[in-house]
Image (cartoon, rainbow, N blue to C red):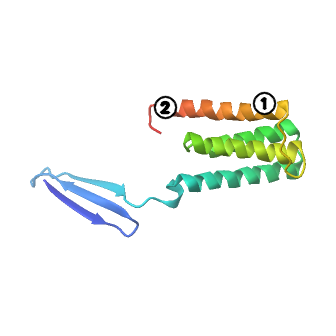
């Protein structure tokens, strides 16, 4: 068998494996990405999830939806934005969603309070993030 390696201009490395010469020569080409893409970095995805969270909050404020709908929108955005992140990153996204909703939808001017309903919403978001993390780790097809 012969092996050939070369690097393309986009950062991928191609490996070609050729079996014995003859009438049934088979070639297998495998591509491996050597340099990660920017979107592969967790910190970048964390920042993008925060950007989507701000967009969702601005959208909810612009169309004037009710408080429960705006909370559901921000919660769904936070959980969807953090679905491919590790647990500690997802916790950060859910805390930011709670802070944005509590500070700008429940109260005004970014005032954060820790009343019983506010803490209940915080616990709800953290539990949802934990449940989704647990479901993600049980998938048989990988991370």
What x and y, as percent, mark residue 137? Answer: 50, 33
What x and y, as percent, mark residue 21? Answer: 10, 55
Residue at x 50%, y 54% (from the top left corner)? 40
Task: Please name whichever residue, 129 or 4, is drawn nearer the observer in this view of the structure.
Answer: 129
Identify the residue under disc 1.
120
Q: Is residue 83 visible to us here? A: no
* Helix, strand or loop status at disc 1: helix
Q: Is residue 27 above or below residue 5?
A: above
What x and y, as percent, mark residue 1? Answer: 13, 53
Picture disc at residue 73: none
Q: Is residue 69 above or below residue 48?
A: above
Q: Does residue 139 appear left or right of residue 16 in this picture?
A: right
- The answer to whether the residue labelled 2 contacts the one labelled 1, judged by CB atoms less than 8 Å apart, is no
Task: Please name whichever residue, 3 or 55, is drawn nearer the observer in this view of the structure.
Answer: 55
Assess disc 1: are there few (<14), some (14-19) or many (≥20) residues with their C-alpha within 10 Å of its C-alpha.
few
Identify the residue under disc 2.
139
């Amino acid at each position: 068998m012969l092996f050939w390696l070369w690097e393309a201009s986009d950062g991928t490395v191609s490996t070609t494996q050729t079996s014995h010469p003859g009438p049934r020569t088979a070639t297998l080409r495998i591509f491996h990405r050597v340099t990660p893409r920017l979107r592969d970095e967790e910190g970048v995805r964390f920042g993008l999830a925060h950007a989507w969270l701000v967009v969702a909050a601005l959208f909810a404020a612009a169309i004037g939806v009710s408080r429960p709908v705006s909370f559901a929108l921000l919660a769904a955005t936070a959980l969807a934005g953090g679905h491919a992140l590790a647990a500690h990153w997802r916790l950060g996204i859910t805390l930011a969603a709670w802070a944005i909703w509590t500070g700008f939808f429940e109260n005004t001017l970014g005032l954060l309070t820790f009343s019983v309903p506010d803490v209940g919403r915080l616990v709800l978001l953290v539990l949802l993030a934990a449940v989704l993390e647990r479901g993600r780790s049980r998938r048989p097809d990988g991370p």
